[in-house]
Image (spheres, rainbow, N blue to C red):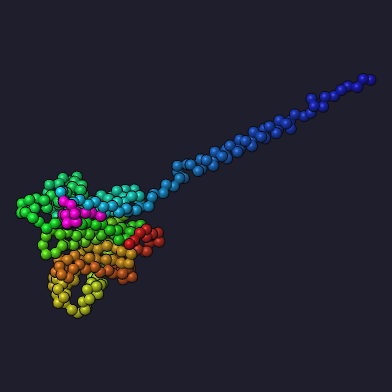
């Protein structure tokens, strides 16, 4: 009998081969889905965290000299100020506008502001000061050079407040130059300057602490009348002003010359440490009283 040939390859089951192809496709599909899910999870807008750049202040300055003058004895005006950037929301822009307004208000006391529009720049105020000098010199002849220097300093800042000190030095003739200092605390959350009653809940209890600190700074014994040393408090009763700031160590007050004493006695700075203010200050502004509080900067 003739043998019948058998084609083994033709009769080999094909299902295993078909299964392998489907398995490969499944693996590719699963890998693709995994990659897509990973990409979506990393780029989904609701899961992204946008971090604001920290608030920072850069120093800047402007100087203008009266026209036609050269040398070191010219009438001049100069401003050293801060320009903020970063922070949350409109913090930086609001601080910059606030600083400009304060500087303009200070410069308005030195003449020439009546000719300026509400949109006038700091340079316009400086030029008005120089023009006043030129006009007086033309009307009355030779004049001693004038000087005007303004400066803004950041004394302390944490995540809730920044403490700014506005300094002014001027000489417009006379026996001596004049100096002036205005301290302000700005709430960085509400973007407004703070009053003393907002920072200290019990201002009545603050008075004896402040008087003791004042007497210590000026070396005035406890029972000595202020007037014996040239200080002028109505009725010999100590009082506080709103010229204050928060520093790294405590609550600082400032009295300018002529405010409570003659020019010869100068200005007075004194501070009350936070250790004495724990029960008096608002927890919102007492450094270290909030677990999330962070001190970002102080000088």
In the image, 112 versus 282, the foreground residue is 112
User: Residue 249 in the image: x percent, y percent?
Assistant: 32, 67
The structure residue drawn at horizontal position 19% and vertical position 56%, both measured from the top left corner, is: 72
User: Which quadrant does the N terminus fall into?
Assistant: top right
Position of 44 compared to 16: left or right?
A: left
The structure residue drawn at horizontal position 22% and vertical position 73%, both measured from the top left corner, is: 218
Q: How many marks?
A: 0
The structure residue drawn at horizontal position 31% and vertical position 48%, both measured from the top left corner, is: 90
Q: Quadrant of residue 262?
A: bottom left
User: Residue 212 in the image: x percent, y percent?
Assistant: 24, 74
In the image, 118 versus 41, the foreground residue is 118
**Magenta part of the chain:** 69-80
The reply to whether the magenta stretch includes residue 247 is no
Q: Can see residue 95?
A: no
User: Which quadrant does the C terminus fall into?
Assistant: bottom left
User: Residue 213 in the image: x percent, y percent?
Assistant: 25, 72
In the image, 236 versus 179, the foreground residue is 179
Q: Can see residue 52?
A: yes
Q: Please, is residue 71 above or below residue 4 in the view?
A: below
Q: Residue pushed farthest front?
A: 71
Q: Residue pushed farthest top?
A: 2
Q: Please, is residue 192 above or below residue 253 in the view?
A: above
Q: Residue pushed farthest right?
A: 1
The structure residue drawn at horizontal position 16% and vertical position 45%, both measured from the top left corner, is: 117
The reply to whether the magenta stretch includes residue 78 is yes
Position of 63 compared to 8: left or right?
A: left
Q: Please, is residue 38 above or below residue 11 in the view?
A: below
User: Residue 59 in the image: x percent, y percent?
Assistant: 30, 54
In the image, 45 versus 299, the foreground residue is 299
Q: Quadrant of residue 260?
A: bottom left
């Amino acid at each position: 009998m003739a043998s019948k040939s058998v084609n083994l390859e033709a009769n080999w089951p094909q299902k295993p081969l078909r299964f392998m192809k489907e398995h490969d496709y499944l693996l590719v599909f699963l890998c693709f889905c995994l990659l897509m899910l990973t990409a979506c999870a990393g780029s989904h807008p609701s899961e992204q965290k946008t971090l604001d750049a920290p608030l920072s202040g850069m120093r800047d300055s402007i100087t203008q000299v009266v026209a036609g003058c050269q040398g070191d004895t010219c009438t001049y005006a100069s401003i050293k100020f801060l320009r903020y950037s970063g922070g949350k929301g409109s913090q930086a822009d609001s601080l910059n506008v606030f600083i400009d307004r304060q500087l303009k208000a200070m410069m308005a006391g030195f003449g020439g502001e009546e000719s300026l529009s509400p949109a006038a720049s700091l340079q316009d105020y400086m030029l008005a000061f120089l023009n006043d000098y030129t006009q007086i010199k033309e009307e009355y002849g030779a004049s001693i050079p004038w000087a005007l220097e303004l400066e803004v300093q950041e004394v302390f800042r944490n995540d809730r407040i920044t403490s700014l000190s506005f300094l002014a030095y001027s000489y417009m003739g006379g026996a001596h130059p004049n100096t002036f200092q205005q301290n302000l605390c700005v709430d960085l959350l509400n973007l407004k300057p703070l009053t003393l009653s907002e920072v200290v809940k019990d201002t009545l209890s603050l008075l004896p602490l402040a008087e003791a600190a004042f007497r210590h700074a000026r070396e005035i014994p406890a029972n000595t009348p202020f007037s014996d040393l040239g200080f002028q408090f109505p009725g010999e009763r100590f009082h506080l002003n709103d010229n204050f700031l928060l520093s790294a160590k405590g609550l600082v007050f400032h009295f300018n010359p002529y405010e409570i004493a003659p020019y010869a006695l100068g200005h007075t700075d004194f501070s009350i440490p936070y250790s004495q203010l724990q029960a008096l200050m608002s927890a919102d502004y007492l450094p270290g009283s909030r677990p999330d509080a962070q001190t970002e900067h102080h000088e």
